[in-house]
Image: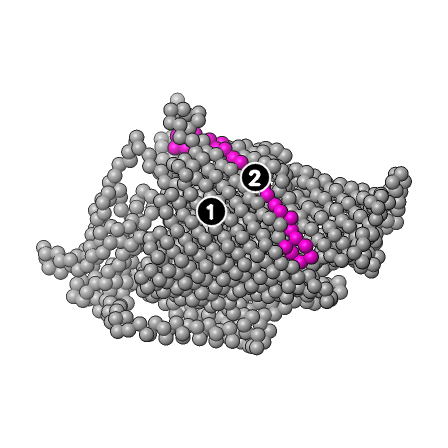
Amino acid sequence: MQRHQSQQQSSSYPVIIHSIENVFASLVLYYYLALYPIRMKFLFTTILCHILFLAANAQGEGQQQLEENAQDKFNDTLPKIFGKLMDKSTGKPVEAASVIMYSLNKKGKDSILGGMLSKPNGDFSFHVPFGNTDVRIVVSALGYKKWEQVIFLGKQEMNNGSFHKDLGNISIESTVKQLQAVTVTASRPALQMGVDRKVFNVEKSLTSSGATAFDIMKNIPSISVNADGTVELRNSTPQIFVDGRPTILTLDQIPADNIEKIEVITNPSAKFDAATSGGIINVVLKKNKRIGLNGIASVGGGVPSLFSANLNVNLRQGKFNFFVSGSFNRSGGTPKSETLRQNKQNDTITSYFNQYSNNIRSRKFYSLRAGTDYFIDNRNTLTVTQSFVSGRFGSDEVQQQQYLNNNQELGYYGLRNSDGKFGFDRRSTNLSYKYTFPKEGKEFTADANYNYGSRADHSNILNELYNPDGSAYSPASTVKDNGNSNEHQLTIQADFVNPITDNKKIEAGIRSYRDKFQSIYNAFAYDSGLPTKLPLSNNYNYVQNIEAAYITFSQKQKNFSYQLGLRAEYSKFDGLLVDSAYKFGYEYPDKIGNIWNALFPSLFVTQKINDKDELQFNYTRRINRPDFWEMNPFIDISDPANLRQGNPQLKPEFINSFEFNYSKNYSNGNFLGVLYFVNNPRDITQYSDTISAHQYQQLNNAGISPNAILNTYINANTTNRYGAEFTLQHTLSKNFDVTPSLNLQYRTIKADVNNISLSNQGFNWGGKLMANYKTDITNSPLWSNIGLQLSGQYHSPRVIPQGKQLARYNLDFAVRKDFLKDKKANITFAVNDILNSQKWGNVYNTDQFYQYSYSRWNVRTFRLTFSYKFGDPNFSISKKQNNKQNSPDVSNEN
């Protein structure tokens, strides 16, 4: 009776989980009809039409498909037994093990009812034919001990087609003894390339050891890094994810030693956020799941003012996997910047202005991340992760200014001293649930991700102007400012994957995103000893909401496959300038007639020519929504000659992306060639002009230049990019490989402001090269296991409205020595930016001015890092506790 009740409980749980498919569909319906009864109905209607189209397509598969469905329905009326095979020592699934089900109905004469090989994920399943009340499951595999179990099925279970017996994770024990004298190692390549994404293995990046994610990006094809700390993917701004989720961290706030790999997706499908118009860079953090205790510790230092320390620890015990990491990173340096300007009127130069800056910077980051995976059973996994990141920055900048007449004679000069402090704190909480169905590849996942961040800053600026003889040109001016902000981000999403057959699959999901931001900034002038509030000050709030749903259908027929996708997103941005009660923002779609603004289709078509060659064409439609800095009307005066201000009137831009990919694998490597076209109506682009007399009068006591340039943003009419990208990964010898990449692009820009044309066009190109060499000197311990890496990049000048961006280039080098048993330790020496050439700059040429300027974010660095791996697969907390309990008490011995 007790056994019968336990079977009842075990059978009911999978039945409930099985109904997730229906619940998920109902959830989509409720979410979009109940929560958004008016503005969301047309979104759901569109998706529903898409589902009906897919269903109609599935019904036309022919008589063979109907017969298969009939057989599946008959099988569903039979009791089912299923489980998963796991290696007892490694915890990994066992593939291709023989699983046989015997009938015990006839005494002494077992008969085979069915057999199969376990799937790659270790799964197996059987339907028990009618009339068999007792069965025996036998598992056998090469290198493993035999496993078997008898299962008793009563008549009630046999007559209940909904009965399911889940055997859970079955641990089978290896019979192979470890060889002491032989060690076999497998190594992933630094770059794995496919037609849909590139995956970069961070462990192979020697030059970024002890650095940050920003430094890693320099080695990845398709990505370019700017001297201002930003990155671009094929000259467009990508979306940064951490573990597949939105983040408020920047790349220089993520330690490189915490990163396992980086995924680059140039043209995401409908499954991903529509705001990923510039592609996706997904930073995957380390989280080991090996049995026992595992970890890695590193410490490093260098110049200027470099220091880093990092610890990653993982403990896998039974149904729990615990992971924790902590890091500290410090950097410094004195980057320089320069501005040379000619002011013009009627094509005649009226005056010159030169500015030279030195900025002593210091940066410190602290981070802590911890979490656990709870493997409830072989189908259900719950993961909780909590992270904290904190940063403290300081800057002390000196600017020297020269004001010259049209004959380049010095009229007066200036000195500007500014010191500032900036700090931030970030917190992130993630809760994830995953249910894996008995059917291979079928799964349901749900995630809730909450990010919170706050920041505070203040600075003091002293402006002094002098005549050529050193006497005061005008009274000195002092500006003091302070600001603080906080941000709350909440993302909730659910995804369902259902392989209908071995060649067909449907994926669907819903997502809700909310971002609430508040910022207060105050600036005061102290010319008369009393504070005067400047118009720079602002109190700025916004709330952004995005509701989304998607569905994709993919099918494979021999060597041909395709994927159709549709994503619907409703987005609303509400901004408020509190002091003036000025409201701004956007809503897409705001009415049924603008439904196209909410729909984002995708199409991927792939033809596999043979085992080595593959072709793919893809198309996606995406959106790029303006960010906080692009919309904030606050005027940044940190550079008195180059002011910056956001534009609250900006609207989102829509992007149509087309790609044609060719991938080829060969004996010594692989090649990926891409032709692409990107069409950007309403492209968000930068626009620059000299400040007006009214603006200068308002900011006169802020110590800015009377001919300062105000840089802001506008929506261009359209921007088109035509390009070709080629990446090669080639092994020259057993110890030497190279990865060159080349990106060619032609850009056209059509824009106008106040009847002034800003249109421009031109060609640009960029190239990267990473070379790796490893010594193979077995008779010399000192010179064996040494790896050398050289990487460099070059990006040619690129057209922008009113001018061009300057060329950028840099070169990095690193050497690493592995030592100790099993190469558990290594020491790395790296030089970043060998030529000290990494800078970012522009040339503007308008009717009012010509300006050449550049700035730097980092300087050349020298770094030495030591790393040590540790672990014990047999480590167990329960064993230690048992040893303590069983140890004799010797405290009272004489």
Taking the image as drawn, is residue 429 in sight? Answer: no
The furthest residue to the top: 894
> In the rendered structure, which amino acid carries the disc numbered 1?
Phe
Tag 1 secondary structure: strand
User: Which residue corresponds to mark 1?
Assistant: 200
Q: Are marks 2 and 1 in contact (CB under 8 Å)?
A: no
Tell me the SS state at disc 2: strand
Q: Mark 2 points at which residue?
A: 811
Looking at the image, which is closer to me, 85 or 353?
353
Above-or-below relation of 386 to 303: below
- Tell me if residue 256 comes above or below residue 662 in the rendering: above
Who's the residue at 49% across and 64% down the image?
620
Q: Position of residue 832 (x, y in %)?
A: 57, 38
Residue drawn at point x = 77 percent, y = 45 percent: 354
Q: Which region shows up in magenta?
A: 799-828
Ranked by sequence position, the earlier of labels 2 and 1 is 1
User: Magenta part mainly helix, strand or loop?
Assistant: strand
